[in-house]
Image (spheres, coloured by chain):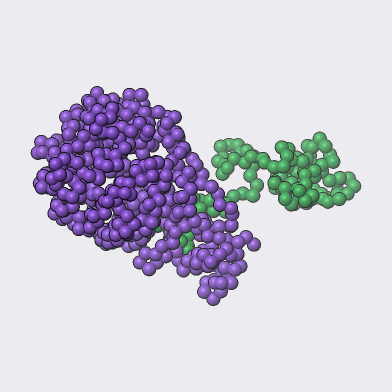
Chain colours: A green, B purple
Amino acid sequence: MRHLKTLNQKAARIEQIVNEQEAAAAQAEDVVALQRGGGVPQSAPHIPLGCAVVFSPGWEVDRTGGTAGLCQPVERDLFDCHIGCYWPAQVPDQLNHAPDWTAKCAAAQKDWRKIDLIFP
Amino acid sequence: MTHLALREHHRFEAAGKPYLFLVPSAAVVGLDAASDMVMQVLASGEKSRADLLTLADGLFSEDEIDGAIHDLVAMRAIGPIEPQQPMPKILPLTPVPLGTMVLNVTNQCNLACTYCYEYGEDKIVDTDNGKQPKFMSIETAKQSVEFMLKESGEAKTAHLTFFGGETLLNFKVLKETIAYARQRAAELGKDVDFSLTTNATLLKPDVIEYLVQNQVGVTISFDGPPEVQNKFRVFHNGTGSYDIVAPKIKELLQKHRRRPVGARVTLTSGNLDVKGIYRHLTEEFGFREVGFAPVTTSAKRTYALDEQGYDHMLAQFTALAEDFKEAAIEGRHHGFSNVKETIQEIHQGMSKAYPCGAGIGLMGVSTAGDVALCHRFAGSDTHKLGTVRDGVDRAAQTAFLESHHLANKTDCSTCWARPVCSGGCYHEAHTRYGDTTKANLHYCDWIRSWTEVCLKVYAEIAEKNSAWLAQFDREPAAEKVS
């Protein structure tokens, strides 16, 4: 803290906690795996929380009818639907309307951010 | 844009610089010019960041104001406007380890101090004709030791304080209890720390020798110069006790070098020369520590402190606290224990839900072996928390914790001094209002003023000789018994 001088032990503890939280926030990854193997420490348990138990991108909308206010970004498990989903309607129609939808996404693990949303 | 508003705090100045005491965290921080400006502007009402920047234009840069806002929000001195949250009521998980047991080895006294809370006009336990024996038996004392060692749980050290009446009237049981406690503690791999409070009338050479050899901590109830001591601290025939106790105290102080001997002074309406008493006790006698407490009594007694009395006491305490501050800054010892105890709490940032450890980490035991909130209630059926034979009555203890939590004291909910005071002494409340759950409203102004004095002393020491404060870094010491 640059503008407050901590005098007693309690103030020092608060400052320490604030510094730790801010350092953690600065280093936080924007995407966290649900689980990491190989004993890699995780900063916090990453529990999938959202509007529904299972994310079905393309179906979820927020309370305004859009996708901006969802609890979790729809991109999160988009590719799971693209490749393995049992319900093809959940991904864009790549035969007719969006043939280039995955053009920028050569390797899903790296490039999934490049996939855009398709609005009818 | 979210508006910012002040959160609960107390602003004070020490040596010309501004500081905040934050509530309820009890954190103490110093302000720089930018954060001070933000606090002062918000004192006139809520403002947005943009408002603050406009008002700071030409005085502080945007970066400085943003930094000050960030720090003040992080420290919770300010924050977005939100409805007042009720104080969380989190009860300590029982069983809490018993840190200090106060053993009332007798309820008899060879003095008849008019103001005595145990024997005087406002006593709550019938010590004359009640069912409590006059002296604790060695059997009860041994059962108490077992109780203490069991209830101390995982703690390595248990503190055993002998109290009375006049403690030394039952010196025989006291000695046997210490021997027994040492033996049992050794068997269990624990330590026991012993201390006692006495009026000094029975400090004969062999008693002094025993206390020295056994490293028993001693606190002496002593009011100071002859004219003060002899006013209330009298024998049953009305004779003053100064001439009897003074040589004995001097002998004890001369011989008992391994532990500091403290004096505990009772202040009454006619006895408020704090500085004079302090000088007498430290310079003429050589007491290491002197603690003062206003008499606990109902307001109707002539010796009770009234508002003027509290004002006078504050002025005296403040003057002595100044001496304490100067000594601390120069790294010298000063024995004014009232300010030392408060500074220790401020340094650690203690924010208390209960005013003291009574009924939690401290319990009093009556001569019959009844366990009570503290020694002041020992023997009172209405404040009983079990017996040394049957252990702590957990239901009674939980009920006590439930009904005495600071969250219940609505009078305290808007007071900035509540992290330090927490409503004040249960016994004082019982004597004044007949109810231990009540906050001691008769000394609120005094507590706030005294806390402010201690905050100022603390801040100045922290700025000028912070190394001196390292002695308070450790865990809190055993509860003071008075």
Picture mark count: 0
Residue B178 in sight in this render:
no
Give the farthest residue toward the bottom: B58
Viewer-nearest residue: A34 or B179: B179
Viewer-nearest residue: B155 or B238: B238
Query: Percent position (x, y) of residue B372?
Result: 34, 33
Q: Point out the image quarter for the N terminus of chain B.
A: bottom right
Query: Percent position (x, y) of residue B110?
Result: 17, 38
Q: Residue at x 16, y 29 (%)?
A: B172
Q: Residue at x 70, y 46 (%)?
A: A72
In the image: residue A22, left or right of residue B435: right
Query: Percent position (x, y) of residue B442?
Result: 38, 52
Q: Point out the image quarter for the C terminus of chain B.
A: top left
Query: Percent position (x, y) of residue B470?
Result: 32, 52
**B366 versus B70 height, above or below:** above
Q: Residue at x 79, y 49 (%)?
A: A65
Q: Residue at x 88, y 45 (%)?
A: A95
The image quarter in which residue B174 lies: top left
The image quarter in which residue B434 lies: top left
In the image: residue A87, left or right of residue B4: right
Residue B174 in sight in this render:
yes
In the image: residue B107, left or right of residue B408: left
